[in-house]
């Protein structure tokens, strides 16, 4: 009897389908009018408990990104009903959100555990930090929202920023390559000025430079942080520019490399011709293009009384020029600078008009630390030292 039962059991095992002994390559689940829903098949991302397929044997071990990129990276960037949306292969240039794509200097790996109302959510520096591969949206953005303090909200996100704030706001914000980590503070109510989330050009008629024809959608993180390649994957995944920017945003030290492209990011929303026509405030163009036609320090030394810079600053002779440091013209005096020398791209905790001076260019004046006082629409005064010139309540 025992031999009969054993023989029957062995015969029964032989009738089991082959998939119990090996994991087959999963077939994509077709979506109606959308991309593949291959995430619905567990074996698309996960190994079997016993069998191992060659292509996915260790794809996600220690780095979930590798499991995602197995399907979401390649040369075929087209998204069809049976193909997942893809990122272009990483060239090692530019920037991206993944751990190995943050540039030459990399912050420490980020991990944050959020507990609220009985919920526990782990945010990590990988694809799953923003995307939920198991969620109903099949890998799209997480449906969890965060406020500017990094606190979990009991509702769906109403902007991309409310997803970004999960990692980039609050005391546990992810470290950045430069600047303060808590970006949420710059968008909170206490900030003096910011590129406010949800703002539109129509809501700021006091800013003549805004390009109302192109700047129609509400302002969001994706307005500046996006793929500059129109044929590539959208969103802040990867960019040929630093900091996953949509266009070049340079500082004064980058002018030699970027030239006129240094302010391209700003010109996506702000009209360059309006800026150079001084419609926002007097001498806007002179700060960006230089105070002299030649833009050279030598020309300033030869004839400062006839230069536009001399007229603006009230100089009558070389003796009238009293720089804050050293008593001589400094490198860069009268030459072009960039938007980033005076303006912060996200916002300013203390000053209006996004004024936050680049301290590698702007220093303390003869009477104290750099400061800006707004006196009205398009008018104010600066107290600082820039390119050797000592501003003390210099008005414009």
Image (spheres, grey):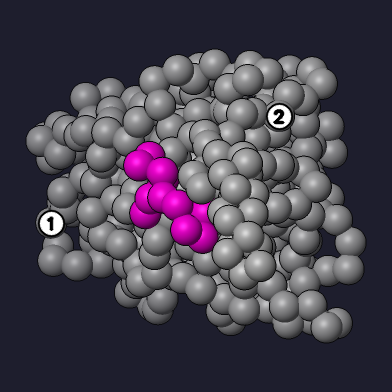
> Is 50 within the magenta?
yes
Earlier residue among tags 2 and 1: 2
Residue found at x 73% / y 82%: 115
Q: Position of residue 69 (x, y in %)?
A: 44, 40
Mark 1 nearby-residue class (10 Å; few <14, some 14–19, many ≥20): some
- At numbered mark 1, what does the secondary structure look like: helix, strand or loop? loop
Say which of 346 and 304 sits in front: 346
Q: Is residue 149 above or below residue 256?
A: below
| Residue where numbered disc 1 is placed | 328
* Residue at which label 2 appears: 29
Q: Which residues are magenta?
A: 46-59
Marks 2 and 1 sit apart, C-alpha to C-alpha, by: 72 Å
Q: Position of residue 326 (x, y in %)?
A: 13, 66
Q: Residue at x 88, y 68 (%)?
A: 154
Q: Does 93 appear in magenta?
A: no
Which of these two is toward me, 154 or 321?
154
Q: Which mark is residue 9?
A: none
Q: Is residue 352 left or right of residue 63?
A: right
Q: Nearer the viewer, mark 2 or mark 1?
A: 2
Above or below: residue 6 compared with residue 283: below
Can you give x and y, in whole percent of width and height, for residue 77 in the image?
A: 49, 20
Q: Residue at x 32, y 35 (%)?
A: 90
Whether residue 28 is visible, yes or no, is yes
In this rendering, would 252 be left or right of 184?
left
Q: Reply above or below: 344 against 307.
A: below
- Whether 112 is drawn above or below 307: the answer is below
Residue 213 in percent (x, y) is at: 73, 18
Helix, strand or loop for disc 2: loop
Give the quarter of the figure containing the N terminus: bottom right
Callout 2 touching callout 1 (CB < 8 Å): no
């Amino acid at each position: 009897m025992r031999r009969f039962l054993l023989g029957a059991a062995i015969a029964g095992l032989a009738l089991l389908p082959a998939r119990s002994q090996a994991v087959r390559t999963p077939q994509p689940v077709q979506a109606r009018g959308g991309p593949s829903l291959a995430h619905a098949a567990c074996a698309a991302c996960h190994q079997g408990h016993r069998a191992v397929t060659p292509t996915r044997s260790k794809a996600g071990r220690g780095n979930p990104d590798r499991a995602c990129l197995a399907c979401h990276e390649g040369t075929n960037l087209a998204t069809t009903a049976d193909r997942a949306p893809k990122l272009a292969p990483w060239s090692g240039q530019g920037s991206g959100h993944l751990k190995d794509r943050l540039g030459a200097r990399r912050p420490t790996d980020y991990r944050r555990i959020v507990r609220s109302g009985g919920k526990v959510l782990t945010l990590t520096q990988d694809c799953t930090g923003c995307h939920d591969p198991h969620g109903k949206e099949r890998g799209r953005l997480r449906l969890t929202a965060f406020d500017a303090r990094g606190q979990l909200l009991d509702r769906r996100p109403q902007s991309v920023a409310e997803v970004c704030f999960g990692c980039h706001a609050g005391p546990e914000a992810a470290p950045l390559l430069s600047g303060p980590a808590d970006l949420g503070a710059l968008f909170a109510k206490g900030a003096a000025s910011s590129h406010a989330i949800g703002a539109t050009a129509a809501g700021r008629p006091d800013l003549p430079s805004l390009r109302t024809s192109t700047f129609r959608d509400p302002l969001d993180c994706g307005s500046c942080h996006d793929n500059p390649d129109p044929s590539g994957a959208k969103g802040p995944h990867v960019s040929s520019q630093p900091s996953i920017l949509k266009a070049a945003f340079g500082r004064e030290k980058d002018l030699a490399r970027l030239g006129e492209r240094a302010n391209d990011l700003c010109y996506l929303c702000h009209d360059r011709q309006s800026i150079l026509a001084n419609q926002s405030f007097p001498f806007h163009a002179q700060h960006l293009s230089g105070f002299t036609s030649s833009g050279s320090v030598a020309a300033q030394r030869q004839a400062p009384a006839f230069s536009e810079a001399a007229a603006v600053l009230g100089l009558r002779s070389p003796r009238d020029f009293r720089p804050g440091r050293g008593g001589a013209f400094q490198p860069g005096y009268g030459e072009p600078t960039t938007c980033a020398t005076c303006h912060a791209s996200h916002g300013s905790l203390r000053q209006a008009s996004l004024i936050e001076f680049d301290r590698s260019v702007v220093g303390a004046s003869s009477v104290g630390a750099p400061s800006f006082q707004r006196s009205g629409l398009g008018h104010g005064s600066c107290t600082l030292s820039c390119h050797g010139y000592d501003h003390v309540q210099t008005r414009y």
